[in-house]
């Protein structure tokens, strides 16, 4: 049917399972996520943070144009890993969904509601001919309207999960091991940020500087998603 035999014949159509029950196009999308730069997210009783690397190997590229963290709503933000073009489309879709919900119901959207809808879209792109899965994964953080910090992920397959701390991208397994060893449920946001930087330092294959790091957070006081100024990142970087 495909002009060649073996397992390779099953990687051309997203809707066709291999004999051992695998969807190769989805696995390729997951590999694109694993090749992305590392994104780390941690939550505690005080809120949640994201720490990402925005380093580029291209010396001619302006690092300010590298965008790995996006604000979705006043209380929701996300980090991406994988293909930036795919991520940008889904971020814009999520922003529209958050605003529709606010207009229709007069209150902010809970993170789990948004993540479930986002995962539904991703899953739909794994079961239709003529399209391919989104080659990106998201880490999303928020403090919901009820004051509870949230940290969730979505994968290209449409799977979503809730976490206390997690990582996506290069060396994600090693990053999760460090998080397991150092996680404290009642840690302050600054301590969470230092831990995120520590993970980036210990898992990066090259030496990194404070300029290579971007940090965002949401706390359980004002419940607003915001970015950490570069001046403070430098201070935290030296302390981590």
Image (tube, rainbow, N blue to C red):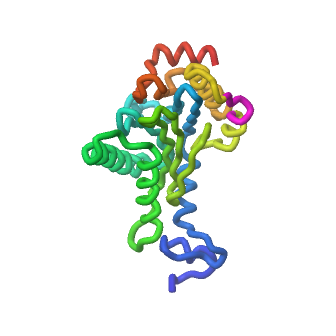
| On screen, residue 114 above or below 25 | above
Residue 180, magenta (yes or no)? yes
| On screen, residue 24 above or below 95 | below
Indicate the quadrant where residue 22 lies. bottom right
Give the residue displayed 50% in from the left and 56% down from the top: 156
| On screen, residue 110 above or below 229 | below
Give the residue displayed 51% in from the left and 42% down from the top: 139
The x and y percentages for residue 176 are: 67, 39
The x and y percentages for residue 108 are: 35, 39
Camera-nearest residue between 55 and 48: 48
- What's drawn in magenta, residue-wise? 179-184
Q: Main secondary structure of the magenta part?
A: helix
Relative to residue 47, is residue 7 drawn left or right? right
Give the residue displayed 56% in from the left and 69% down from the top: 23
| On screen, residue 58 above or below 17 | above
Q: Is residue 216 visible?
A: no
Give the residue displayed 52% in from the left and 65% down from the top: 25
Q: Quadrant of the C terminus?
A: top right
């Amino acid at each position: 049917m495909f002009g060649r035999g073996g397992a390779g014949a099953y990687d051309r159509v997203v809707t066709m399972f291999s004999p051992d029950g695998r969807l190769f196009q989805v696995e390729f999308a997951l590999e694109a996520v694993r090749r992305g730069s590392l994104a780390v997210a941690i939550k505690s009783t005080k809120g949640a943070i994201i720490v990402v690397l925005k380093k580029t190997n291209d010396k001619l590229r302006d690092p300010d144009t590298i965008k790995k963290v996006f604000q979705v709503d006043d209380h929701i933000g996300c980090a991406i890993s994988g293909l930036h073009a795919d991520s940008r489309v889904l971020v814009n879709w999520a922003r529209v969904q958050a605003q529709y919900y606010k207009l229709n119901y007069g209150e902010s959207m809970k993170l789990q509601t948004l993540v479930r809808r986002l995962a539904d879209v991703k899953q739909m792109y794994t079961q239709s001919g003529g399209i391919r899965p989104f080659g990106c994964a998201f880490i999303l953080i928020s403090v919901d309207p009820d004051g509870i910090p949230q940290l969730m992920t979505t994968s290209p397959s449409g799977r979503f999960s809730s976490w206390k701390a997690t990582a996506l991208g290069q060396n994600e397994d090693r990053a999760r091991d460090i998080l397991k060893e150092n996680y404290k449920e009642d840690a302050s946001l600054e301590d969470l940020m230092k831990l995120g930087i520590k993970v980036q330092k210990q898992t990066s294959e090259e030496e990194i500087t404070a300029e290579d790091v971007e940090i965002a957070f949401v706390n359980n006081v004002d419940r607003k998603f915001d970015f950490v100024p570069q001046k403070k990142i430098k201070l935290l970087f030296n302390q981590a």
